[in-house]
Amino acid sequence: MSDSQVKITKHSPALWTATFDNPPINLIDYDTIAELSDLVTELESDADVRTIVFDSADPEYFFAHFDVLGDPARAARLLPTRTGMAPWIDVLARLSRVPVVTIAAIRGRARGAGSEFVLACDMRFASREKAILGQPEIGISAPPGGNPMVRMAELMGRGRTLEVVLGGDDFDADLAERYGYINRAVPDAELDAFVQRFAERVASFDKTALAAAKSLVNDVTLPHDSVFPPALDAFRKGVMSEDGRKRLGALVSRGMQKRSELERDFGRHIGPQASVGE
């Protein structure tokens, strides 16, 4: 479909690329979730695909964050899910377990649910000059709803996870690499070629062996599905609280979800210098 938000390129039966394209800033909305769910279903069943790379058509935004102004009733159209969980956390949980190697090539901003998505991928390579990651939900009085904390804690430890989640600030690629948030920071001019070479290398190996190796790593690193629904409940409660609604309204009035200075520099705009009532 020409209006698809997730455009699939099949370089070969073994190697695919999924490119996100949802102007103006690649928000994750319920259409995005539906398309990702369909893609995950295909990855779960395709006999040939071994590696998929996720990238963005927008060099400024990989996935900005979840569309907080979308109609929650639309989520009902995506139910029931395969795991029985809410649609977004269903996608993340299944993505982390598909028998395919998943690689995020991050150029631009991946915050909130965008950060949750890349953390659910097997590997993350990011543009040194252009990638920004973060979990800013604390700025709307809520913990992250997809519970990226359990994945972060496995990657970077308790203290750094709390720094990311409780500070709500932006992390550039160099610091993200140092913390273990991403695998590597790669010079922007080299990112595409680097990821393509690595993806082609992995896709050249036996699918059964790749899937078995990934499954064995999953056994000792992936969280149980039961940890995800409470986080989503806590996120919804926080956003719907009086303080959450006030903070969210102030951010929307200052350009949230538009191609704005606030979205470019979100971490700074939820800090103490940003008045809740302005």
Image: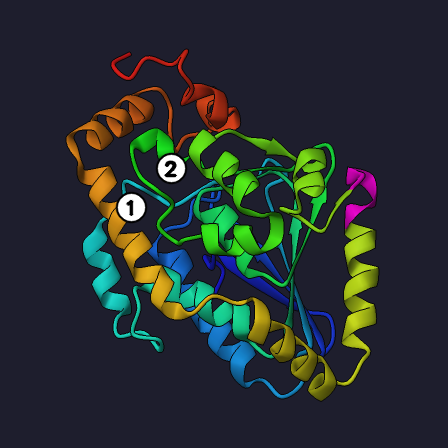
Residue 59 is at least partly visible in this image: yes
Magenta-drawn segment: 186-191
Please tell me whether residue 187 belongs to the stretch shown in magenta. Answer: yes
Label 2 crowd (10 A; few <14 / some 14-19 / many >=20): many
The dot on residue 137 is: 2
Q: In which quadrant of the rendered view does residue 270 lie?
A: top left
Residue 14 in picture, x, y percent from top left: 72, 78
Q: Residues within 10 Å of mark 1 (few under 14, many from 20)?
A: many
Residue 259, compared with residue 114, is above or below; it is above
| Picture quadrant of residue 272 | top left
Q: Is residue 13 visible?
A: no
On residue 206, which mark appears? Answer: none
Would you say residue 159 sits in the magenta stretch? no
Residue at the extreme left: 242
At which x and y percent is residue 135?
A: 46, 39
Please name the residue that numbered disc 1 is placed on: 235
Q: Looking at numbered disc 2 in the image, what kind of residue is underneath it?
A: Glu
Amino acid type at image mark 1? Phe
The coloring applied to the image is: rainbow
Sequence order check, earlier mark of 2 and 1? 2
Relative to 210, 95 lies left or right: left
Please provide percent x and percent y for residue 140.
31, 32
- Looking at the image, which is closer to me, 93 or 230? 230
